[in-house]
Amino acid sequence: MEIEIRPATERDDEELMEIVEEVSLEGGIEMVYARRPTFFRGAFIEGYSVQVLVAEDKENKKIAGTITRAKRKVWLNGEVREIGYLSTLRVRREYRGSPAFFKGLLFLKKLHEKDPVPFYLVSLIEGNSYAYRMVKGKGILPEFFEYGSYITHAVFLKKRIKEGDVEVVRGSENMLDDIVLCIQRNGKRREFYPYYTPEDFGTPLLYGLSPDNFYVAIKSGKVAGVLGKWDQRDFRQFRIEGYRGWMRGIRPLYNTFAKITGYPVLPPPGSVLNFFYACFPAVDEDDPRVFYSLLSRLHNDAVGKYSYFVIAFSPDDPLLRVLKGLRKEIYPAKLYMVAWERPEIRKGIPYPEVAIL
């Protein structure tokens, strides 16, 4: 078997989309993470420099696997730092354990040696350990150093909630500088919070996100907090493929219960989940009144249009308490720093932004 590792090109697009969809999330719901109509649009939001690698079976003219290496700027220990991010590790079932996987990791290591970063951030959902099983203990990649956990919350949007008492307005182009300044000064107090400038808006890095997608809290005539709304369904989707085991049989009964109680129904196979990301929360002094006002306004504007929204926090994040009392499902995950030596960074409150993971 002759395997060639090379950068992906546009002619690989269709195969890359197929490979991504071969791996479904574990559990009763068979769900795939899709990137249609093009794989690359979803990759470019992961960093300002993105390298998509493919392992091609030259004999069968088929892509055996892929991995994405990105570089992004984040706040780390109060400074803007450049780190790496690894994502979308996929190997077709028939090639797992073949030279394709190991050659790809060796090629990745060579890329790192030419263009090093202090570590690579990796996010793994608990219960979907495919990527971790693929690389752990192989002796090719560096070590996985666990940084901490974060919890993704899917907040249901069945009915309106009481709104907060802080003034909230919608963002605009004229407010872009103030929005970004608020994100920067508050992101500085977190670890891994993405660093952006006004010039990043309108580029592939923030595709589909504009200033008018932000909610802006005003106190004493000044911006006191912001929260974004990022609908990525036109380039990144979660699609229901089917239901396994007892979930298949109980779905009709559950949907009847869900309609009565206000929980989202389990959609039919083939459906794309109807949600958006509540992203880049930035609140001066982590004021819960300000954040609740932002969150409640965003929530109520979305009722009747979406089934839920997604937002993620570390268990130690003071903003997390504002979600208490909202109907939601939670999905724990782990953050790892992948490096050859343990990175020397101060342990703080992580905020990697789930919308770009």
Image (cartoon, grey):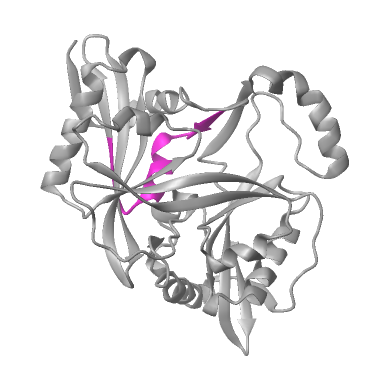
Q: Could you say where residue 260 lies in the image, as x and y percent from the top left?
A: 88, 40
Residue at 38%, 60% (x, y): give it: 192
* Residue 304 makes an appearance in the image: yes
Q: Which residues are magenta?
A: 31-52
- Residue 295 vs residue 10: left or right? right
**Residue reaching furthest bottom?**
220
Q: Could you say where residue 132 lies in the image, as x and y percent from the top left?
A: 36, 34
Say whether residue 36 is magenta: yes
Above-or-below relation of 324 to 294: above
- Residue 86 vs residue 210: left or right? left
- Residue 60 vs residue 170: left or right? left
Say whether residue 264 is magenta: no
Residue at 61%, 88% (x, y): give it: 221
Q: Could you say where residue 20 lies in the image, as x and y percent from the top left?
A: 43, 28
For residue 246, what is the image quadrant? top right
Above-or-below relation of 316 to 128: below
- Residue 58 vs residue 247: left or right? left
For residue 239, what is the image quadrant? top right
Q: Could you say where residue 39 lies in the image, as x and y percent from the top left?
A: 41, 35
Residue at 52%, 61% (x, y): give it: 210
The mark total stands at 0
Above-or-below relation of 163 to 106: below
Image quadrant where one finds the N terminus: top left
| 156 or 356: nearer the viewer | 156
| 217 or 246: nearer the viewer | 246
Residue at 46%, 73% (x, y): give it: 186
* Residue 8 makes an appearance in the image: no
**Residue reaching furthest right?**
260
| 294 or 61: nearer the viewer | 294
